[in-house]
């Protein structure tokens, strides 16, 4: 039976509590003394970073709206954004501008593999059914043209749509909510269904003769869940801190969970990123080792999967129960917080956790422009209050047609320090780096080897003096000039006001950008500025250096994506009072043009939903956008949204297909 009071301690929001107690400087103290107009330096003014007086390499020059960039190279003049901005709304639908259409697609429960079990409107599907259906709470995704691995990937009417499923709404996943007795989970079937609703879906899709999209009954269709067997590669493979009862040698693991944003590789594979994973585990130990305490593992778990008997569930209990690590699951949390590589074209392949990229609450992974004969460089944010931004540089160089995933196993991980001068440094988290060793000695901290450094990435970043950021989330790289943009969603724990963020806290968030000072992106120096301060008209600044207005005001920027012509698409993740009252309305997606400073609202989501995840076909006639947790907080007897199926139905996360009514390119 269900006891409502017993649910209070379970099924929280999923946001991890801050665990960074270092004395490292916060980003707000670093931008103190720079005026808003200096740090923003919008597209209609001096241009990004021009105020710094930096001598930037030609590959990394900022664009000007006058017909040439700072290196004097011409670019195509940009016209105004060709749509009318949407008004703020609080309706239970997806709104797009006139001339566009938005069609829901592959909602939670869509059958894609196995016996193709139909979704039951009362959520009465079994755990096995869920393993053969699209998972819950869609997030980051990517469209792989069907020729992506055998050619240049230009086919636009047939491909694989690969998408993350971040977490579950337990009150909707089961017919009458989860069964909890005396504060404990008691149904193994329910928990298995929850495990199977997590992870990743690979769906082969095709555009039909009428222009609509359909799911193909394909052998490539696949579910990767929180129980799927996986390999561990990179410097931490086989480490003592990864040994468990399931994997005594520390080389293998099971499952991926809390999959938020994503990435994709130059060789045509998908990267899913494990974000707020610590809450899935519990430990009753009085004193936790640093690899658990620094990441926020506590004495109770979010979903109570650890309450049940059996190896499938006991792995979520990190309590020391045996003399040796290979006899219990004290190290199981160390198997999470990684980036996982999945080959979407090979359903028989085993996903791989890439430890060289570091262990933290990965929001996503974005690559710098990939050039033959250069290292691959990629960036990732740690989505928690007061955490850091990271960069990885491969040891070996990219060779088209010959390079593969080994580039993600051997390289150097760096963390960012943003200096008040508008410059910044990438600080190596490498046990063989002299500066890193000096920092460890000064802090009185010892790492056994590079695997230990990467398992304890947050601690290593603390030691070298990285800059605390306001929840670093998605990253995106401008294809026209190589600028790297990151969203900083918000930070309620900040207490210091300054000229760039004149707030006692940062409830609205902002977007930062930087320019690498090395031509190949692999160097250690960069120059940075702010692109956007989110907020209401009275407390904000847009890309043009002016306050935001009714056409573009926003809060809590999250998802970022550049189209091929250098326009930045911005998605929001507001919650609480920001979402339900005040000037912002439902969560939304906007388009910003860094060249002109123009920004307009393009989409507004349904009630209670987050707008997240975005990808497009190569011909740019189809845009895929994910709508997560419509009617957040709904239960079977209290539906706060009925999108996308209509009155009387449970809300379901879904992908939305956006196209122009006339069939032309989107913009």
Image: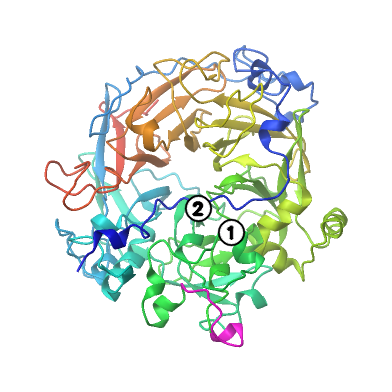
The residue identified by callout 2 is 16
In which quadrant of the rendered view does residue 194 lie?
Answer: bottom left
How many numbered discs? 2
Mark 1 and mark 2: Cα distance apart in space: 9 Å
Q: Is residue 567 visible?
A: yes
- Of callouts 1 and 2, which one flags the residue occurring earlier in the amino acid sequence? 2
In which quadrant of the rendered view does residue 471 lie?
Answer: top right
Residue 658 painted magenta: no
Nearer-the-camera pick, 624 or 174: 174
Instruction: Return the x and y of residue 518 as percentages of the image width and height.
Output: 77, 38
Against 25, residue 180 (above or below) is: below
Of the 4 image quadrants, the one containing the C terminus is: top left
Q: Dominant secondary structure of the magenta stretch?
A: loop
Q: Is residue 380 left or right of residue 515?
A: left
Instruction: Return the x and y of residue 36 as percentages of the image width and height.
Output: 64, 18
Identified at 26% across, 56% down, the residue is: 171
Instruction: Return the x and y of residue 108 as percentages of the image width and height.
Output: 27, 54
Mark 1 burial class by Cα count in 10 Å: few <14, some 14-19, many 20+: many
Instruction: Return the x and y of residue 502 as percentages of the image width and height.
Output: 60, 23
Q: Secondary structure at mark 2?
A: loop
Q: Is residue 150 left or right of residue 376?
A: left
Of the 4 image quadrants, the one containing the N terminus is: bottom left
Residue 409 disc label: none
Against 136, residue 602 (above or below) is: above
In which quadrant of the rendered view does residue 476 lie?
Answer: top right
Mark 2 burial class by Cα count in 10 Å: few <14, some 14-19, many 20+: some
Q: Secondary structure at mark 1?
A: loop
Give the magenta part as a residue range.
316-327
Residue 324 painted magenta: yes
The residue identified by callout 1 is 295
């Amino acid at each position: 039976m269900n006891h409502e009071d017993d649910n209070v301690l379970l099924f929280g929001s999923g946001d991890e509590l801050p665990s960074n107690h270092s004395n490292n400087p916060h980003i707000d103290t670093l931008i103190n003394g720079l005026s808003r107009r200096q740090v923003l330096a919008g597209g209609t003014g001096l241009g990004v970073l021009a105020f710094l007086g930096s001598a930037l390499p030609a590959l990394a020059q900022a664009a000007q709206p006058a017909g040439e960039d700072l290196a004097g190279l011409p670019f195509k003049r940009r016209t105004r954004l060709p749509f009318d901005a949407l008004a703020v709304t609080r309706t239970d639908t997806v709104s797009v501008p006139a001339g566009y259409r938005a069609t829901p697609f592959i909602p939670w429960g869509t059958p894609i593999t196995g016996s193709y079990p139909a979704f039951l409107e009362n959520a009465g599907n079994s755990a096995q059914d869920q393993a053969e259906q699209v998972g819950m709470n869609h997030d980051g995704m990517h469209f792989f043209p069907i020729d992506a691995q055998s050619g240049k990937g230009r086919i636009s009417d047939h491909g694989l749509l690969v998408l993350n499923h971040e977490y579950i709404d337990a009150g909707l996943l089961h017919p009458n909510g989860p069964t909890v007795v005396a504060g404990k989970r008691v149904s193994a079937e329910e928990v298995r269904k929850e495990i199977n609703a997590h992870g990743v879906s690979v769906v082969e899709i095709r555009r039909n003769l009428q222009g609509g999209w359909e799911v193909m009954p394909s052998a490539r269709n696949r579910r990767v869940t929180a129980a799927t067997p996986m390999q561990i590669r990179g410097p931490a493979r086989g480490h003592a801190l990864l040994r468990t009862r399931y994997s005594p040698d520390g080389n293998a693991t099971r499952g991926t969970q809390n999959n938020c944003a994503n990435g994709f590789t130059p060789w045509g594979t998908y990267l899913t990123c494990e974000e707020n994973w610590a809450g899935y585990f519990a430990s009753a130990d009085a004193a936790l080792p640093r690899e658990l305490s620094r990441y926020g593992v506590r004495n109770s778990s979010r979903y109570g999967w650890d309450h049940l008997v059996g190896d499938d569930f006991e792995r979520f209990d990190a309590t020391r129960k045996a003399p040796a690590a290979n006899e219990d699951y004290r190290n199981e949390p160390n198997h999470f917080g990684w980036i996982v590589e999945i080959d979407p074209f090979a359903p028989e392949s085993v996903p791989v956790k890439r430890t060289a990229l570091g262990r933290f609450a990965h929001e996503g992974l974005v690559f710098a422009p990939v050039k033959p004969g250069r290292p691959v460089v990629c960036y990732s944010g740690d989505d928690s209050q007061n955490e850091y931004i990271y960069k990885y540089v491969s040891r070996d160089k990219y060779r088209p047609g010959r390079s593969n995933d080994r580039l993600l196993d051997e390289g150097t991980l760096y963390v960012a320090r943003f200096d008040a001068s508008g410059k910044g440094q990438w600080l190596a988290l490498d046990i063989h780096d002299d500066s890193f060793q000096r920092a460890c000695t000064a802090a009185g901290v010892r790492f056994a080897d590079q695997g230990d450094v990467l398992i304890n990435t947050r601690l290593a970043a603390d030691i070298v003096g990285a800059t605390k950021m306001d929840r670093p989330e998605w990253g995106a790289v401008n294809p026209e000039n190589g600028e790297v943009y990151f969203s900083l969603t918000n930070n309620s724990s900040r207490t210091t006001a300054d000229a760039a963020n004149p707030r006692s806290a940062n409830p609205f968030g902002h977007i930062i950008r930087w320019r690498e000072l090395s031509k190949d992106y692999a160097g250690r120096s960069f120059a940075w500025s702010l692109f956007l301060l989110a907020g209401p008209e009275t407390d904000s600044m847009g890309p043009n250096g002016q306050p935001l207005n009714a056409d573009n005001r926003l809060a809590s920027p999250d998802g970022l994506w550049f189209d091929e012509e250098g326009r930045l698409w911005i998605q929001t993740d507001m919650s609480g009072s920001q979402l339900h009252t005040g000037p912002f309305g439902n969560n939304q997606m906007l388009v910003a043009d860094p060249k002109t400073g123009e920004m307009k609202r393009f989409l507004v989501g349904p009630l209670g939903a987050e707008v997240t995840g975005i990808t497009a076909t190569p011909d740019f006639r189809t845009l895929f956008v994910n709508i997560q947790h419509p009617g957040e907080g709904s239960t079977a007897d209290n539906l706060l949204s009925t999108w996308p199926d209509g009155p009387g139905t449970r809300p379901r996360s879904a992908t939305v297909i956006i196209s122009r009514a006339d069939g032309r390119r989107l913009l």
